[in-house]
């Protein structure tokens, strides 16, 4: 078999490396450059003043930032924990269900994830409308008062989390359903012979095998939830009274609504660092080895 030198594989990788270099190194370098200068809509075409870490200090001393970080924590923890719970439970149910049940329900379950965030946001906004919304019509029909989801702080956060769970859970189901193929039928038969209950089989046999897949699902859903701003923007625009203004949306609105590009860049870089720390902690705490 012919052996190639080390440069031949690198030549094939050059196009992908070039695109990655442009999308990552250049973009983030530009972001860092803007964050270290005073760049606003008013002086964008003028000479920028170098301000060092002043924008980063401003970000983490701004009361609005602290409020957005609190909202992000509530949204991320609620959304991710429930996505992982429902995703794991449903994927295991489909694994243990009859083939006919699986064939019927699996396509239905993944429909939300196949739709775009825009469709998901406007669908939930329409369903939660105070006067014509499907949810409030049901509440009114059974004798409860209508809820102004977009005008109440707690209700708005609940709506955003609910929409995120509806849209994101199918991904967890798909990922863990493919992971369930690692559980051979022989393991199930042996567990039955040993008298193991369904709960014991799931916790002592299935979970250790599924742990690397669960960690991957947890990392991806956490990063996506932490960086989610389009769903929140389309549903509530961060309102009412900044009750659903999450950290990425805070940076987006500062940059593109207020024209404070340096401040928005500093927020985005802060979000990047937080994501990296979260991923590191997940991998460190789980103790999962992804490669030899």
Image (cartoon, rainbow, N blue to C red):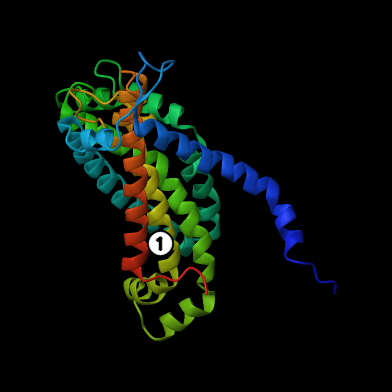
Residue 86 location (% of width, % of height): 35, 52
Give the structural element (helix, strand or loop) at label 1: helix
**Which one is nearer the viewer's eye here, 160 or 64?**
64
Residue at screen point 55% across, 52% down: 103
Q: Which residue is mark 1?
A: 214
Residue 210 location (% of width, % of height): 43, 68
187 sits to left or right of 275: right
Residue 221 location (% of width, % of height): 39, 49
Compared with 206, 68 (above or below) is above
**Which one is nearer the viewer's eye here, 164 or 223?**
223
Residue at screen point 16% across, 25% down: 152
Task: Give residue 59's quadrant in the image.
Answer: top left
**Which one is nearer the viewer's eye here, 14 or 80?**
14
Q: How many marks?
A: 1
Compared with 220, 8 (above or below) is below
167 sits to left or right of 111: left
**Which one is nearer the viewer's eye here, 199 or 50?**
50
Residue at screen point 85% across, 71% down: 2
Badge 1: few (under 14), some or many (20 or more) residues near its Cα, within 10 Å? many
Compared with 177, 1 (above or below) is below
Residue 20 location (% of width, % of height): 58, 45
Residue ranking furthest to the right? 2
């Amino acid at each position: 078999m012919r052996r190639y030198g080390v440069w031949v594989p690198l030549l094939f990788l050059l196009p992908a490396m070039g695109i990655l270099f442009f999308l990552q190194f250049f973009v983030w370098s530009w972001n860092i450059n803007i964050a270290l200068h005073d760049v606003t809509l008013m002086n964008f075409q003028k000479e920028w003043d170098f301000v060092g870490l002043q924008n980063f200090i401003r970000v983490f001393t701004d009361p609005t930032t602290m409020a957005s970080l609190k909202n992000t924590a509530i949204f991320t923890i609620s959304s991710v924990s429930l996505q992982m719970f429902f995703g794991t439970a449903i994927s295991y149910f489909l694994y243990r269900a009859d083939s006919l049940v699986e064939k019927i329900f699996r396509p239905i379950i993944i429909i939300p994830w196949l739709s775009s965030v825009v469709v998901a946001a406007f669908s939930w906004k329409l369903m939660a409308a105070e006067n014509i919304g499907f949810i409030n019509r049901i509440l009114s029909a059974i004798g409860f008062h209508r809820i102004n989801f977009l005008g109440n702080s707690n209700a708005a956060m609940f709506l955003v989390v609910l929409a995120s769970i509806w849209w994101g859970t199918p991904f967890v189901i798909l990922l863990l359903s493919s992971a369930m193929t690692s559980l051979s039928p022989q393991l199930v038969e042996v567990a039955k012979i040993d008298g193991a209950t369904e709960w014991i089989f799931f916790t002592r046999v299935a979970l250790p095998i599924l742990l690397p897949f669960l960690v991957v699902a947890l990392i991806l859903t956490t990063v996506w939830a932490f960086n989610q701003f389009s769903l929140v923007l389309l549903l509530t625009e961060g309102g009412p009274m900044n009750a659903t203004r999450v950290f990425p949306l805070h940076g987006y609105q500062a940059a593109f609504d207020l024209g404070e590009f340096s401040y928005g860049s500093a927020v985005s870089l802060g979000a990047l660092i937080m994501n990296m720390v979260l991923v590191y902690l997940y991998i460190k705490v789980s103790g999962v080895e992804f490669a030899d």
